[in-house]
Amino acid sequence: MTTLRIADFTRYPGGRYKRISKFSGEEYRDDHLAPALKDGEVVVVELDGTVGYGSSFLDELFGGIVRKMRWHSVNDFDSHILLQSKNRSFIDEARQYVAEAVTSNNAVRP
């Protein structure tokens, strides 16, 4: 099991895209989360230790990984990623974006 702490990346998460802000959800997804998933182990993502999260960061990180990996169920996400935080609202919001991305993937599924 691999553990990633977003606070080790930054205490001040940015926006959605690299071109818009430093420490973006896109950057964290592409440079940290996606490579960690290649080992095939469950990746624990620790959300504590930052000043908070913008919705665009969380959507691009977690909804974006669902879209990128072409997962078609929340169970696909859960079998690869475990979210941890003392602040339940961080987890709930991230899981909302996961569910929306799953719905989107299934809408375009051939």
Image: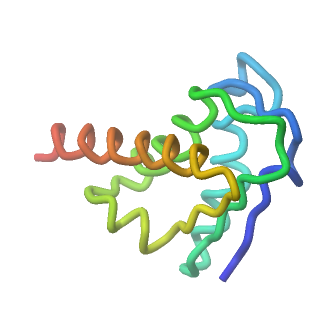
50 relative position to 53: left or right:
right
The type of colouring in the image is rainbow
Quarter of the image where one finds residue 57? top right
Residue drawn at x 66%, y 83% as measured from the top left? 1
The vertical placement of 61 against 71, above or below, is above
Horizontal relation, residue 101 to residue 51: left or right: left
Give me the residue at 52% from left, 35% from top.
59
Q: Position of residue 15 (x, y in %)?
A: 69, 24
- Residue under the point 87% across and 42% down: 10
Q: Is residue 77 above or below residue 22?
A: below
Q: Is 63 on the left-hand or right-hand side of 1?
A: left
Compare residues 54 and 69 and report the one nearer the observer. Answer: 54
Question: Where is residue 81 drawn, in percent x and y?
Answer: 53, 66
From the top left corner, tell me how far across and down residue 37 is, in percent: 58, 68
Q: Quadrant of residue 61?
A: top right
Which one is nearer the viewer's eye here, 73 or 39? 73
Q: How many marks?
A: 0
Q: Residue furthest top?
A: 20
In front of the other: 83 or 37? 83
Q: Is residue 67 left or right of residue 58?
A: left
User: Residue at position x 19%, y 46% from top?
Assistant: 106
Residue 68, x across and y down, in percent: 44, 48
Check the image and name the residue furthest to the left. Answer: 110
Q: Is residue 33 above or below residue 64?
A: below
